[in-house]
Amino acid sequence: MKVAALIPAAGSGTRLGLGPKAYVEVAGRSLLAWSVAALAPHADEVLVALPGGLALPRGVPARTVVGGATRQASVQQLLRATDADVVLVHDAARPFVPARVVQDVRAAAQADGAATAALPCADTLVRADAPGSARWGEAVPRADMWAVQTPQGFARAVLLAAHAQAEQDGFEGTDDAGLVARLGARVTLVPGDARAFKVTTPGDLQLAAALARTWDT
Ligand code: C5P
């Protein structure tokens, strides 16, 4: 059974403000290089979606495709470029995902057809009282709430069908498991890890740099 790691890395990194995020370095290594290193041992091939006109950072062993205007479009390009039976989709922006999480997602994807890393919610959750408002509206019970991470693993045929349906419906999601779930298919939640957080803001870079000092998983 062939497994491909698909790494969408074509984002512009607007919130971070340092140019395309995948190229931003932590401890002398790009976020993309950290992410590829985390996934590569668990896949037969690694494919990366890059912003148009940019090349892979030095020392990143992967095939490349040009990404799309949205994350979803970038994943679609990656899906079209592989014939693997199982795909592991992982954001370049999550450089520190432990091997245990990748292994568990891969195993669950092979067993169930669709799986994602996710963390049970530890914080109190509240909905704002109106869209865009910063005022407390209604608390949302956090029991049974999970924060979804990557990697996410799928039988490639399942994810292809989910993307095709989303495109037909004009539906734009924020991840791939959501596209599969909206088809009514079962998606297994695999316990993720807080260290697999998404580097989004300048403060996250500080956390990532601290983590890089002791990283060996
Ligand atoms: O923007 P966000 O942080 O949600 O992006 C998640 C991942 O999707 C990042 O690794 C980013 O590079 C990737 N992405 C992409 N193509 C886009 C937008 C985002 O590959 N058009």
Image: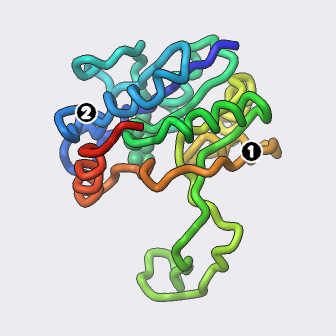
Q: Amino acid at mark 1?
A: Val
Q: What residue is drawn where x is 58% and y is 17%?
A: 80
In the picture shown, does residue 65 fall above or below 27?
above
What x and y, as percent, mark residue 108? 72, 36
Q: Amino acid at mark 2?
A: Ser
In the picture shown, does residue 153 fall above or below 200?
above
What residue did someone put label 1 on?
Answer: 187
Please tell me whether mark 2 sits on a helix, a strand or a loop.
strand
Question: Ligand 1: does it lie within 8 Å of the C-beta at label 1?
Answer: no
In the image: residue 124, left or right of residue 21? right
What residue did someone put label 2 on?
Answer: 30
Q: Is residue 112 visible?
A: yes
Query: Closest to the observer: 159 or 147?
Result: 147
Task: Tell me the quarter of the image containing the C terminus.
Answer: top left
What x and y, as percent, mark residue 59? 26, 17
What x and y, as percent, mark residue 169? 69, 41
Q: Badge 1: few (under 14), some or many (20 or more) residues near its Cα, within 10 Å?
A: many
Q: Earlier in the sequence, mark 1 or mark 2?
A: 2
In the image: residue 15, left or right of residue 100? left
The mark tally for this picture is 2
In the picture shown, does residue 151 fall above or below 149?
above
Residue 153: mark in rendering: none
Q: What residue is drawn where x is 73% and y is 23%?
A: 157
Q: Residues under labels 1 and 2: Cα distance?
A: 31 Å
Q: Quadrant of ligand 1?
A: top left
Query: Closest to the observer: 18 or 43?
Result: 43
Q: What residue is drawn where x is 53% and y is 85%?
A: 129
Please tell me whether mark 1 sits on a helix, a strand or a loop.
loop
Q: What residue is drawn where x is 44% and y is 48%?
A: 196
What x and y, as percent, mark residue 27? 19, 39
Query: Closest to the observer: 53 or 58?
Result: 58
